[in-house]
Image (cartoon, rainbow, N blue to C red):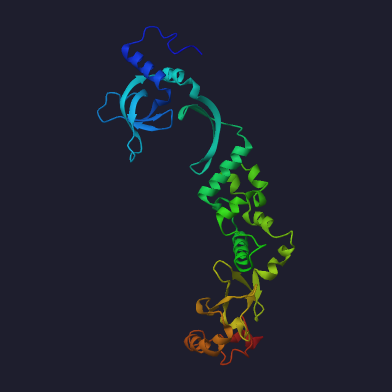
Amino acid sequence: MAAPCQGRGDLSDDATAGLVAALAFPERVAKARSEGSYLMANGTGAALRDGSALRHSRWLAVAVADRPSHATSAQIRLGAVIDERTAREAAAHLLAVGAEVHWEDGDVVAREVERLGAVELTVRPLREPDPALVREALLEGLRRDGLGLLRWSADATALRARLGFLHRTLGAPWPDVQDDDALLARADDWLEPELSRARRRADLARIDAGQALTRLLPWATGEAARLDELAPERIEVPSGSRIRLDYGGEQPVLAVKLQELFGLARTPEVAGVPVLVHLLSPAGRPAAVTADLASFWQGGYRAVRAELRGRYPKHPWPEDPATAEPTRHTNARLRRG
């Protein structure tokens, strides 16, 4: 490259001052970010004082600047106007061109950037970015915006909750799937190969999170085959209904109409943990909550029966629920049957 002073012809005094300052302090050539605000090649922000005659300059060579410990940017005390050509020539050793792939504004951004140190000179889209860089950008997006970027069906969300319950209750070999950071630390184990094929946010939304999570099940130990035994999706109650369990809280919840549990003396358990039974009225509204059905039948049931049988006279409200026939139906259906 030609020396900065070559091919310039006669320089004005101001241009000469700028060239000298740029050659003396190449790491402090600076490009405007907004009026009066600059970014120097060394990555430091810098600002001109109000009223400075240099505030409209696109490029500066900063000769003197100081940065108080509490300030977010340096204060330019002495500088000179330069042009981009001078900046490029004076700080030629800082010139670099490279691919930059990262997560920005909710999606992958891939571009080729020419930089003068920290200062961007030219930017253009990168059509065929390195897949490894794209993968890292997608992981960055998942860390920043959360695993909700994946496709979470109701079944996938339920599976995550079931596995979370087993991890809390039994520990290893059941994986920690409730913590996003823990899952992302194991991205190679459960998000591949889909993650490596993805190129943008829309591709993440096509990844079936539930199917991917099954890769974390303890297949090697054989425990994976016990998932439905230890944390079943549904429990069959005395009426014959198969009721879905909710594992979203600390304790599994079984929400079922009270009449369907007649005759059930012992609270159901999963993985040795009693479920929290939400007893519902015939209209499906909460009537009582218990983790001890035997105690409820002996005590709480009487209060619930007294309150609700007048509202729902078509439904059975036996005095002794322990010996009553469980049912999903009204008294009229029972008589006809």
Q: Residue furthest top?
A: 9
Q: Position of residue 32 (x, y in %)?
A: 37, 28
Residue 209 lies, with reference to residue 117, above or below; the image says below
Residue 61 lies, with reference to residue 317, above or below; the image says above
Q: Position of residue 200 (x, y in %)?
A: 58, 42
Residue 324 lies, with reference to residue 245, above or below; the image says below
Q: Residue furthest left?
A: 51
* Residue 301 visible within the image: yes
- Residue in the picture at 50% in, 77% down: 286
Q: Position of residue 259 (x, y in %)?
A: 58, 83
Q: Across the whole image, how many numbered discs are drawn on residues? A: 0
- In the image, 99 versus 302, the foreground residue is 99
In which quadrant of the rendered view does residue 332 lie? bottom right
- Residue in the picture at 64% in, 78% down: 237
- In the image, 120 versus 152, the foreground residue is 120
- In the image, 294 versus 303, the foreground residue is 294
* Residue 329 visible within the image: no
In which quadrant of the rendered view does residue 203 lie? top right
Residue 255 lies, with reference to residue 44, above or below; the image says below
Task: Give the position of the C terminus as an image quadrant.
Answer: bottom right
- In the image, 48 versus 148, the foreground residue is 48
Query: In the drawing, does residue 37 fall left or right of residue 161?
Result: left
- Residue in the picture at 69% in, 66% down: 227
- Residue in the picture at 37% in, 7% down: 10
Q: Position of residue 245 (x, y in %)?
A: 60, 70
